[in-house]
Image: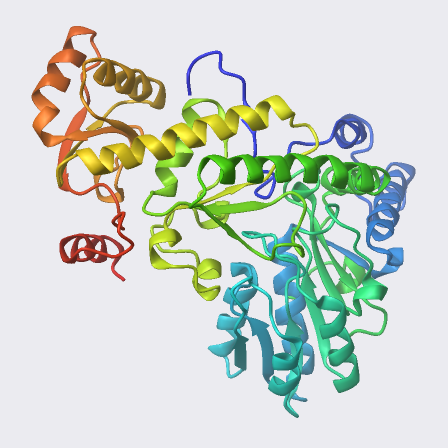
Amino acid sequence: MKMGTEIIYLDHAATTPVHPDALAAMLPCFGYHYGNPSSLYTLGKKAGSLIDEARAQTAALIGAEPEEIIFTSGGTEADNLAIRGTAFAHGEKGKHIITCASEHHAVLNACEWLEGRGYTVTYLPVDSYGVINPDDIRRAIKKDTILISVMHANNETGTVQPIEEIGKIARQKGVVFHTDAVQSTGKIPVDVTGLNVDLLSLSSHKIYGPKGVGALYVRKRTVISPLFSGGGQEKGLRSGTENVTGIVGFGRACKAALNDLHRNISQVKALKDGLEQMLLDKLPDARINGHPTERLPHILSISFDGIEAESIVAALDAHGICASAGAACTSKSVEPSHVLTAMRVPPQMLYGTVRLSPGWENTEEQILKTVNVIDTAVNEFRVFSDKASADTSYLLFPDTVTAYQAKLAVSKAGIDCVFAVVPPQFRYPSASNTAVAIPRSGKAISLKTLSGISHEPVAVHDIQGIGRYSRNSHLSKKEHSFWENITGS
């Protein structure tokens, strides 16, 4: 990122800044209200009362009762408590679980863990929009089915699932129903009664609260087992001294989200819709992933044919714009998104997917700048791909700022180049993960140019090709072999 560049944060699906109201509520907990909430003296009772207030604020956001909220360390723990806790509590009744192929890894990995301990899991498919068919769930239920877990809205594409209908099926069959609502809560209306859920996972840092805290809604008379033993806090389901500061911030963030919900939905959706339409106008061959209407107001998943998403993200970062290549939780991986794979997104699009997720603090001017940067980056890559030979050189630099300055200098010298992400096999701690990619034939001129401005690269690597997929929507044999060797797929 260039020095002095304004930060434009468009990755609210990954995390959010802390809301000013949440921060203000948290500060006294560091200096005045530091008591252990399990203590009987006044200092401890004050901390306990703050937790009670936050519990009520969290419950109000999802239409629950305060006593149905169990605070956890985040959405991942909430998912594990719901899934493993149900499995442990109902293992004598049955050991069959139903979930969806496009779930968050917190759910999928918990299910996989249970499979290694004698449980069976049915992973149901989704359609091309990422939507699960409730009838598939009905058909998958067996006598020994103890749990259905389907996320409310997908974290990569924003697709909203038919949770209410699935909940009715679960109720009719007497099966516990869990939904991961980490991405949807605070972004669209969420009501646990209307959704017919027994368990619902929440996360603070997705709704302008602090990191390290979340919650699991547990409907009255729903039986689950704790994951670990201890002092019996949170009704014995989540032992350990409560994170009072985090819980207070979470509760206040929930209150702010509820108060401003409809205003934020309208504002953020307008930003996201404008971003989507302008990108499609400039790059009409781009693909929007997710349901056209049943989608969260703040998530845009867009794929570009034959373009590496990581390099688009690097170009955005050079201009102070924060976005994700797919999902932030897995963006460091060179494996394709399991969500987009489940949706049968074409192979040439899989690696070219960028997720942009605005928040209520973004502006129209920021959205316009983002569109222009993406448009320029995509076209630069396509021109480079068309003009450059198969032999490409990567010039590595100690930091992103130097790399971007080098890119401008090399381009000014008349050498075709792009600002790109360093292939995984060439990354190392003392160099930036961004580089300048040039045709190998222009390496000598580029190095001479950079030497003249004291911007010599710390390393130079020559490889065959710059991307996993070709512009013509198919893999060349050489490219395919090269990337298979890297990913081990």
Residue 73 seen anywhere in this rendered image of the structure: yes
Task: In the rendered view, tell whether residue 129 sits above or below residue 367.
Answer: below
Residue at 25 percent across and 23 percent down: it is: 397
Residue 224 seen anywhere in this rendered image of the structure: no
Residue reaching furthest bottom? 143
Task: In the rendered view, tell whether residue 219 sits above or below residue 465.
Answer: below
Q: Quadrant of the C terminus?
A: bottom left
Q: How many marks?
A: 0
Task: In the rendered view, tell whether residue 163 sits above or below residue 271.
Answer: below
Residue at 75 percent across and 73 percent down: it is: 165
Horizontal side of 467 relative to 160 (left or right) equals left
**Residue 44 percent across, percent down from the top left:** 85, 41
Residue at 69 percent across and 44 percent down: it is: 204
Residue reaching furthest right? 42
Residue 358 in which image quadrant: top right
**Residue 316 percent across, percent down from the top left:** 44, 29
Horizontal side of 440 relative to 188 (left or right) equals left
Colour convention:
rainbow
Horizontal side of 71 relative to 3 (left or right) equals right
**Residue 128 percent across, percent down from the top left:** 51, 64
Front-most of residues 230 and 363: 363
Residue at 68 percent across and 82 percent down: it is: 90
Front-most of residues 417 and 105: 417
Front-most of residues 456 and 471: 471
Q: Quadrant of the N terminus?
A: top left
Residue 300 in which image quadrant: top right
Residue 416 in which image quadrant: top left
